[in-house]
Amino acid sequence: MYQCKKCKTEIFLNEHTISQNPLSFSDCVNTNIKEGHRAALPVLEIQCKMCHSVVGIVHTNPMLFCADEDAVVLPTALPTNNFEVKDVKEEPMECGSKSQHTSNVVTAVLYFGSIFVPVVTALLAAN
């Protein structure tokens, strides 16, 4: 059974049936079905009836059900991912860093070179 994270409402009673046959998503309890677009593709959004948050998406071509894991409490009977998420911290670059300066110089040379090379070539060809 799935629950909405916002309001703790029971959403899907039998997720296995829904994932095997996406056409049975209309049997979900406490949900509203709304047509929408994700990445310019037509989808059916399954929304919680109480708080209207999107708890799942049914892609219409091909027919595929995807639960929104950020909005739904997943059942504990399903296997979990065994991936370890490592927190990677990036060092912020300062505006005056050497690599930024080098990048600015290269950009300036290419920009002004693209302007002056045709002008100089035209002047030399005219003489």
Image (tube, helix red, strand yellow):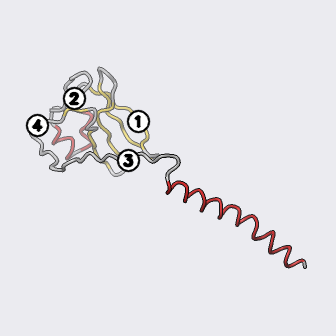
- Of residue 6 and residue 35, the one placed in the foreground of this image is 6
> In terms of sequence position, does the residue under pointer 4 or pointer 2 come before the other?
2
As measured in the structure, the alpha-carbon distance from the residue carrying label 1 to the one carrying label 2 is: 18 Å
Front tag of 1 and 2? 2
As measured in the structure, the alpha-carbon distance from the residue carrying label 1 to the one carrying label 4 is: 30 Å
Residue visible at 61% across and 60% down? 107
Question: Circle 2 sits on which residue?
Answer: 11
Question: Circle 3 sits on which residue?
Answer: 91
As measured in the structure, the alpha-carbon distance from the residue carrying label 4 to the one carrying label 3 is: 38 Å
Q: Quadrant of the N terminus?
A: top left
- Amino acid carrying label 1: it is Glu
Measured as percent of width and height from the top left, residue 49 is found at: 30, 23
Residue visible at 17% across and 38% down? 15
> In terms of sequence position, does the residue under pointer 1 or pointer 4 come before the other?
1
- Amino acid carrying label 3: it is Glu
> In terms of sequence position, does the residue under pointer 3 or pointer 1 come before the other?
1
Measured as percent of width and height from the top left, residue 32 is found at: 32, 28
As measured in the structure, the alpha-carbon distance from the residue carrying label 3 to the one carrying label 2 is: 42 Å
- Of residue 124 and residue 43, the one placed in the foreground of this image is 124
Indicate whether 21 appears above or below 32. Answer: below
Task: Please give the label number shown on residue 35.
Answer: 1
As measured in the structure, the alpha-carbon distance from the residue carrying label 3 to the one carrying label 1 is: 42 Å
Kind of element beneath mark 4: loop
- Label 2 neighbour load within 10 Å: few <14, some 14-19, many 20+: many
Front tag of 4 and 2? 4
